[in-house]
Amino acid sequence: MFGDYWRFDRPGFRELDWVREMMDQLFPQGESMDIRSVPRGTFPMVNIGATDDAVRVYVFAPGVAANDLDVSIQDNVLILKGRRELPARQPGGEERTLATYRRERFAGEFSRAVALPEGLDGDAAEAKFRNGVLEIRLPKREELQPRKIEISAA
């Protein structure tokens, strides 16, 4: 069934890898023309957005259990650490060893540091984990939130 995978290791494909590496060298910091804002292989992927009262960080960590994640904030840097394992059991529940022909999913320990905007209250941070997505809400400090100024008639 998987006997045809050897075709993808032919010299023509190695030349395409060489072209990709040359393109990587043309861009600063070795980044390729990827639509992502981080280099290939970065895990976990992160989206960060802000509202008037808080910054929300969405960490996409499929295959990671909530108790395998460690999240901390130090000097406006969000530090993510954890571990992701490959499943040892098949969906039917039986345990077996598979011959691996190709592995594209990262497994093992990971860590990532993400710079956050200034003025966040890290002590009031809240985190929720659901379906492989960790949502972290970091409220802005009270003095940095917009305030409405009442105007009185003179």
Image (spheres, grey):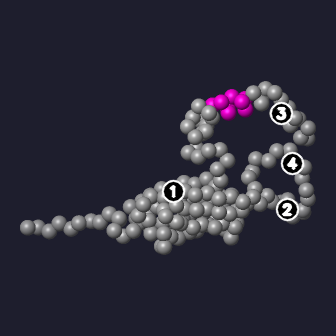
Q: Does residue 17 belong to the magenta stretch?
A: yes
Q: In x, y percent, where is residue 37?
A: 56, 45
Name the N-terminal-most of marks 3 and 1. Answer: 3
Magenta stretch: includes residue 57: no
Left or right, 13 with reference to 61: right
Query: How far apart in space, not on screen, are marks 2 and 1 (Cα)?
Result: 37 Å
Q: Which residue is mark 2?
A: 89
Mark 2 and mark 4: span between their CA atoms?
Answer: 15 Å
Read off the residue under disc 1: 115
Residue 34 in sight here: no
For mark 3, what is the residue? 9
Report the amino acid beneath label 3: Asp
Residue placed furthest toward the left: 154
Q: Amino acid at mark 4?
A: Thr
Q: CA distance from mark 4 to mark 1?
A: 37 Å
Query: Which residue appears at 77% of the width and 60% of the height?
Result: 85
Nearer to us of marks 3 and 1 is 1
Number of the front mark, 3 or 2: 3
Magenta stretch? 16-23
For label 1, the SS is strand
Q: Earlier in the sequence, mark 4 or mark 1?
A: 4
Residue at horizontal 58%, vertical 58%? 113
Residue 54, percent from left and from top: 44, 64
| Rendered location of residue 33, percent (x, y) | 59, 36
